[in-house]
Amino acid sequence: MSDWFEAEVRQLEQHPLPSPNTAIAFYGSSSIRLWQTLERDFAGHTVANRGFGGSTLHECLRCFDRLVTPLNPRAVLVYAGDNDLAQGASPEQIHSDVRSLAERLAHQLPGTPWAFVSIKPSPARQALVGAARRANELIESELSDTAHSTFIDVLSEMLDHHGSPRRELYSDDWLHMNPDGYRLWQGLIEPWVDQVDPIVDDASIPA
């Protein structure tokens, strides 16, 4: 692991731990780390941002026991994979790492619901859209037969009718998302969050 990753991971390890079985762990690369409105976007839920910038799925696997397992989370949402593609990983390699991640979850956090957010497109990596599609297809097929897992497709909604990334969703680097991109993600992820962590209306509970 690079010194940069290690420093950031150690910093995350210092964050206070929520009560067991309360937090939804948002885990993965910079698309998670840079989600500055995460708590506001999922108000009413306890969320823990465990993203670290530039990470690959392989790095997420290596750090899982340090950043996710100690939370004893209510649920886990994972986003990673586009950095893997940018570094030359094949869709099949990414699929294999997701399978290993599923096995890690089943072993370390049995019965915990989790979701994988599909690899997103971006204008800066437009040449990788085809590989992202293939990886997502393999992952979606894998998770359809994996207990407690959900696949959340964001790629389809982030492409225009020409099949190119919708530039209005991205920041000036054409790689990371702007607030409009995160609003799109919120809308796609929120139904799963509400399912795994229903908000109880105290007013509806008889005294």
Image (cartoon, helix red, strand yellow):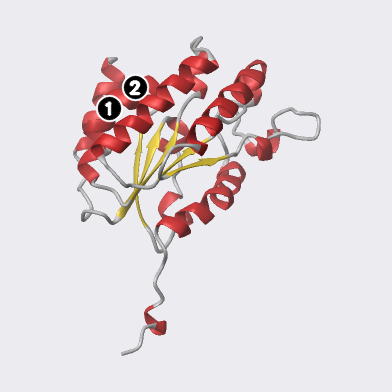
Disc 1 residue type?
Cys
Q: Residues within 10 Å of mark 1 (few under 14, many from 20)?
A: some
**51 over 114 or under it: above or below:** above
Question: What residue sits 52% from the left and 23% below the top?
Answer: 82
Residue 73: x %, y % from top left: 28, 48
- State the residue position of label 1: 63
Percent coordinates x, y for residue 47 in the rendering: 36, 51
Task: Tell me, yes or no, if residue 48 can be seen here.
Answer: yes
Q: Which residue is mark 2?
A: 59
Residue 34, disc: none
Q: Amino acid at mark 2?
A: Glu
Q: Residue furthest right?
A: 162
Residue at figure coordinates x 47%, y 59% from the top left: 194
Q: Residue at x 39, y 59 (%)?
A: 197
Residue 41 vs residue 131, the one in the foreground: 131
- The residues tagged by marks 2 and 1 sit, at their Cα atoms, a distance apart of 6 Å
Residue placed furthest toward the bottom? 207
Marks 2 & 1, CB-CB < 8 Å contact:
yes
Q: How many marks?
A: 2
Residue 55 in view, yes or no: no
Vertical order, 206 against 3 (above or below): below
Q: Residue 95 location in percent, x, y?
A: 48, 22
Viewer-closest of 148 and 202: 148
Q: 180 or 141, which is in the foreground?
A: 141
Q: Quadrant of the C terminus?
A: bottom left
